[in-house]
Image (tube, rainbow, N blue to C red):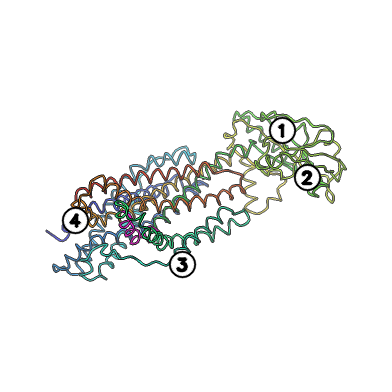
Amino acid sequence: MTFRQFAYRNVIRNRRIYAAFFMASMFSVMVFFMYSMLLFHPQMDEGFFGDFAATGMIVAEIILYIFTLFFLFYSMSAFLQARSKEFGLLLLLGMEKKQLNRLVFLETMLIGAFSVATGILFGYAFSKFFFMIVREMLQLQSLPLYLSIKPFTLTIGAFLSLFVIIAMTSVVFIREQRIIELMRGYLTSDDRQSYSTFKAILGIVLLVVAYAAATFTSTRVVFTLSIFLPPIAALGTYFFFTHTVLFFHHQVQKRKSLYWNRYRLIAVSEGAVKLRENARMYFIVTIVSTVAFLSVGTLTSLSSYTGQYRDLNPLGLIYSSELDNPLERQHIRMLTNELENEGLSYSMVPFLIKKQTSSYTQFEVEILREADVNSLAVAQGHPLINLESGEAMFIPYSENALTILENSSIQTVLEESNVPISVRGVYPRMLFPSMILGANVVVVSDQDYALIDEPLQGQSMNDSMFNFYAFHIPEWERTKSIGLNLDSQMTESIYQNQLNDLPFFFENPGLNYSIIRATFSLLLFTGLMVAAVLLLAAGSFIYFKLYTGLERDKKQFAVLKRMGLTDQEMINIVNRQLIPQFFLPWGIAMLHSAFSFLSLQVIWSDLADVSILFEMTLVLVAFTFIQVVYYFLIRWRYIAHVKAS
């Protein structure tokens, strides 16, 4: 048998240990390859979507590569620890350290080459389906499957170099140990690990502080807290697993009424050993799981915004113009012609909006006429208003304003024109997009509107009024090709910081929605793929540690069986050992994510008045279901191996 055959048979013989390692590696390669296929696609080279998709794919691939490097390095070190007795025996029989290093290198590269080949094969097989999803997200006419050497070269070069790095660095764990240390094997000591009571309490305090700050944050400090809270929570998590868990375990051991139980005695003592020896691993699993939850949760919250986009933007097109704008009529004619050419029905309601100063607040107020508001309400299917002379009503500037202004009652005077009005309540529907007209907008009766004939103090009449055209379009999602010339002028002015120089303002919610939906959908899909790799790796960390100590566990249960332990009693003990290992890191990650989502809700409420409660609950429930399924799958295989002892 040649040396290479020996390396190959070693991999085959240890296939149970390497199974999760191989699957995680293959999945990472598959995702990386599909992103590469999209990155080099010939139809993704032009336009906003092409630039955005390329940027998203590059970022995703960098994250995948860095994390996979860390994951494989950690996994390989766990495997080498599990095989320490085997390596010690080989050295004892006369194998040189160089030969052992070469053996490990060949085994790692063999697994790596097979992972890369299999990952690329499955990646190319699923690329067509991947392109179909991306095509729908970006609303492209076609995104066909293609064949190019670039994605293959990038993927093979990236991951083979990664496995070379892992293979060359992992042998350090063997080189630094003597033969006697290797022969002792993995998990050789059950001595109680010391802990610090101060650090145990500090871990709880840091977590409570982070959770409290995230719960009671406000829009003024939320971005500052987003910088300081993650390190605080991470440090608290580290102390929790390395000290707090041991502290609680010691408290349980001191209470014999809890500890001295036929199942609990074995399960708690053995589980505590594994929690002590794997504390840092559980910390890593918690952080990785939290990152996966937050990435998916944050990106899912973007879809919450798109789902409520129509409620936040009830108009189909918006055009406002200064009174001296010479292009106003031309622009309105162009928009109406484009709508008619597209076969879109619409209702256009022109407003002449006047500005006055309120004596109650001394702030500027924008005044709408009752007849114009009723025309727009009829078009949108909302109730009409009926105001008497001297009466007025607020127009809501956001969803929250409906509640804030519902019972308001203000007596004020429009100072420049000396028109007294009584503002009572708020119109019960959103007629205009949030803040498109400002926060102080009222509708007055036609009689009072006619009395407003004086300009704002210190301004001309032209500066005190402006025209506003509200287009109600039932099929508003089809307007993405309307007003592209005006939209390009707006975009160019924004880039050049010259928006105030334009005599008009134009907004096409249908066009914005198509861009936002495609952008957010692609981000969400990318995040889901990356999160899948992170979650697979997080679960694999526990799998590796569980199975590297399997031989030791089998011997322990064999002794217990000879003492009369039944299969059902063994299952009860296994459950009590495995549940903390699987769900303690998971539970802490869920807590981290839940409180982070509270801060995220504050940000969304400030930006767009959007609720993300449903989406966040869905994300946490979905991930919990995945973990439960994964737990029962690993538990089933673990019990099968232990019973075979």
Tell me the SS state at disc 3. Answer: helix
The quadrant where residue 432 appears: top right
Q: Earlier in the sequence, mark 1 or mark 4?
A: 4
Spatial separation of the CA atoms under disc 3 and disc 2: 59 Å
Q: Are marks 2 and 1 in contact (CB under 8 Å)?
A: no
Q: Earlier in the sequence, mark 4 or mark 3?
A: 4
The quadrant where residue 633 appears: top left
Identify the magenta region: 267-283
Tell me the SS state at disc 2. Answer: strand
Q: Which mark is residue 365?
A: 2
Q: Is residue 288 magenta?
A: no
Q: Amino acid at mark 2?
A: Val
Q: Which mark is residue 198?
A: 3
Q: Amino acid at mark 4?
A: Tyr
Tell me the SS state at disc 1. Answer: strand
- Percent of width and height locating residue 492: 63, 49
Q: Is residue 41 above or below residue 157?
A: above
Q: Amino acid at mark 1?
A: Val
Q: Nearer the viewer, residue 273 or 181?
A: 273
Tell me the SS state at disc 4. Answer: helix
Q: Earlier in the sequence, mark 1 or mark 3?
A: 3
Quickly name the residue at label 4: 8
Q: Is residue 277 magenta?
A: yes
Q: Label 4 crowding class (10 Å Cα cut-off): few <14, some 14-19, many 20+?
A: some
Quickly name the residue at label 1: 349
Q: Are marks 2 and 4 in contact (CB under 8 Å)?
A: no
